[in-house]
Image: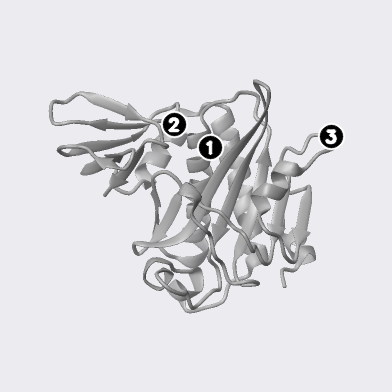
Amino acid sequence: MFDSELFENHLATSWLGRSFYFFEELPSTNSYAKQLNGENSQHGALVLTDDQTGGRGQYDRIWKAEPGKNLTFSLVFEPQKAERFTLLTLACALAVSEIVNACAEVDTKLKWPNDILCNNKKLCGILTETQFSGNKLERVVVGLGLNINQVEFQGELAEKATSLRKECSKEFSREKVLADILQKIEYRYRLWNQFDADLVKQINRALIGFGEWTRLEVNDEQLDGEFKFLGVNESGSLIALNKDYDIRSFSHEQVRVQA
């Protein structure tokens, strides 16, 4: 079972994860995070479960993780402006990638718009959801599923998924990995909140297919010809150059990169 006391001993953030909700079992950490209430701000709250029974991914896919082996958690943010959420998702993904690369000595890359791959297999998935009260943004919930110590994956995941343990043949402390990830996300969130231009450049360098000619799929239909993948801009839209050297931009709901 996840050792909450050990995690809190490792945690070195200023605000992220200091409000901590842990459950042995929970249908969805994102759903729980969206239901948090109270008079005080929930900015920086962490919701973690050892067994997520109804995890969700992008495009309504199911996220399955072996209980007690991985990290399934959600983070609550309350930014001042209701914009650039794709960039926030990628900033969190970059933070996870940096920690994984350092602690496991592997090379991970970001797959637009919300996955982290290692050796072309899925290591981590992210689902970002927003809550509004009328036109006012209440919170942004970023849910993450990171495969840590799981060794066997069932069905189609056997060929598509991996974990830190599978890549490195050793067991990892989930408590230490999570504490390190939160510290890095806190740093990346500050850069995102400050509209830091270098953050966009760092994200782009980590994206699979960046600077390459690729095929694009928009609303489940493949576009004709190839496009040079230019990464994301400061608003979080994907930008690409066609053969006529016209720059096009897409929201993450529209486009998928076939790198």
Please tell me which residue is depicted at 41% across the width and 37% down the height of the picture.
252
Q: CA distance from mark 1 to mark 2?
A: 8 Å
Query: Farthest residue in the top direction?
Result: 135
Residue 122 appears left or right of 242: right
Q: Quadrant of residue 191?
A: top right
Which callout, 1 or 2, points at the residue further toward the start of the chain? 1
Which callout, 3 or 1, points at the residue further toward the start of the chain? 3
- Mark 1 residue type: Leu
x then y, percent, for residue 33: 71, 46
Where disc 2 sits, the SS reads loop
Q: CA distance from mark 3 to mark 1?
A: 23 Å
Q: Which of these two is toward me, 131 or 148?
A: 131
Quadrant assignment for the N terminus: bottom right
| Residue located beneath label 2 in the image | 236
Residue 118 appears left or right of 170: left
Within-10-Å neighbours for mark 3: few <14, some 14–19, many 20+: few
Where disc 1 sits, the SS reads helix
Q: Which mark is residue 88?
A: 1
Please tell me which residue is depicted at 60% across the width and 41% down the height of the picture.
187
Within-10-Å neighbours for mark 2: few <14, some 14–19, many 20+: many
| Residue located beneath label 3 in the image | 40
Where disc 3 sits, the SS reads loop
Determine contact: label 3, label 1, CB under 8 Å.
Answer: no
Please tell me which residue is depicted at 62% across the width and 56% down the height of the picture.
180
* Scheme of colours in the image: one colour
Determine contact: label 1, label 2, CB under 8 Å.
Answer: yes
Q: CA distance from mark 3 to mark 2?
A: 30 Å
Q: Quadrant of residue 222?
A: top left
x then y, percent, for residue 63: 53, 60
- Regarding residue 161, the answer to whether it shows in the image is yes
